[in-house]
Image: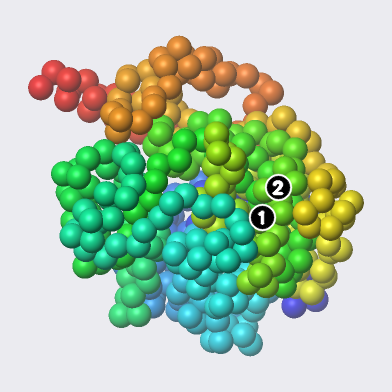
Amino acid sequence: MNAKRPTILVTDAGRGSAISIIRALGRKGWRVIAADTDAQSLGFRSRYAADTLLYPDPETHTCEVVDALYEGAQKKQVDLIIPVTDALILPLAQARQRFAEVCQLALPDDAGLAVVTNKRATLQLAEKLGVPIPQTILVHTVEEAAAAAQKLSWPAVLKPLASRVHHQAGGTRGFKVSYANSPAELVKKMESYAGHCPVLLQEYYAGVGQGVELLMNKGKPLAVFQHKRLSEVPVQGGASALRESVPLDPELYDYSLRLLGEIQWTGLAMVEFKVGAAGPKLMEINGRVWGSLPLAVHSGVDFPARLVDLYLGVTPPPVISNGAVGHSAYRADYKIGVRSRNFDLESTWILAVLYGKRRHAFLPMPSRREGLVAFLNLFNPRTKYDILSWDDPAPGWGEMGKVLRKQRAKLQNLKSNDEE
């Protein structure tokens, strides 16, 4: 490690979660290198980025991006690389031995990654440990999907077995969740997956999204946080646009510890649940930096600094629990009721709701009144922003300009489509 101060390279520097890491580490006085594929990356504008690094697009140049990060780590004397997205986690995990003598990688071990990047393996683990899950059937073909759907109620959810598939020959392909409300629609949706990626056909479970975020060391918790989703994009289920810190739910915490403890997880992870009429059900485990990380930092949980301490040899004490797993009393030290928004996603949510644009007509949609309230709340000073920050304004102002241009173009397209 650098004798003066550690040097940490953070990938995907244009994302709000990455910028939150850059700021948290920079405020500690550590040397932070912001790395991205885009020369105009918002993270490059941060006052806390001491240096920058450009690398090729990992979606199409997998081998080249590993080479670029390896050479950059050598040249810039990097102590730790924090990969933010799966697009870099997967190729770096395959190249971890190559980096061993150059720097540390903030990566879980291969066995843990194999579970959390395979949704079926995650659900099988949950069943084994008594963690409730939605009714799920694995299918590979259109015919299998049509037969399996007879056992489920409509609407049905089609979840690709892996969000991303990394090909050794080069390139990473992403697959998204979709919905179907009839046999004919199911067949049409399944055709895009068949031959490329197996699919988990799942019952649609209505509820409120809740995430339990943890930093773990060999299956033991070092830091914990929980949030509730207030709005998502797509509107009827997806990435969180606006969320709020909530008290740690002992049942969800118990389930999360069971899952991550069983696979001896080391590093950051978010265990995602939906809490509905039948109680909580596991949706997935995100074994990476999650998009709502800025909310945790705003609420007082310094995941970035503790992650660096963990990988560079200074291990913090475990989270203090006032009882064993299964008991009702837990201690989690963070502010409750803090809200933070992803301005890009929140503006997309507001536009979709105000315009009444439904992606799935058979799923519930917020009212236009809710959209108007959300628009007015954009000016509420008590709600934090993922990127906009008064002590580091350049990334936030850059985001505002990009988002406004993007939403203006969307509005023009919507109006053009209506006129046609």
Where is residue 174? Give x, y as percent: 34, 59
Q: Amino acid at mark 2?
A: Glu
Q: Residues within 10 Å of mark 1 (few under 14, many from 20)?
A: many
Mark 1 in CB contact with mark 2 (< 8 angstroms): yes
Location of residue 47 with respect to 310 vertically, above or below:
above
Question: The residue tagged with tag 1: helix, strand or loop?
Answer: helix
Residue at the limit of the structure toward the left, as seen here = 420
Can you identify the residue that label 2 sits on?
251
Can you identify the residue that label 1 sits on?
255
Image quadrant occupied by the C terminus = top left
Residue at the limit of the structure toward the right, as seen here = 322
At x 45%, y 62%, the residue is 119
Q: Residues within 10 Å of mark 2 (few under 14, many from 20)?
A: some
Separation of residues labelled 1 and 2 (CA atoms): 6 Å
Question: The residue tagged with tag 2: helix, strand or loop?
Answer: helix
Give residue 359's quadrant in the image.
Answer: top left
Where is residue 39? Give x, y as percent: 43, 55
At x 41%, y 55%, the residue is 136
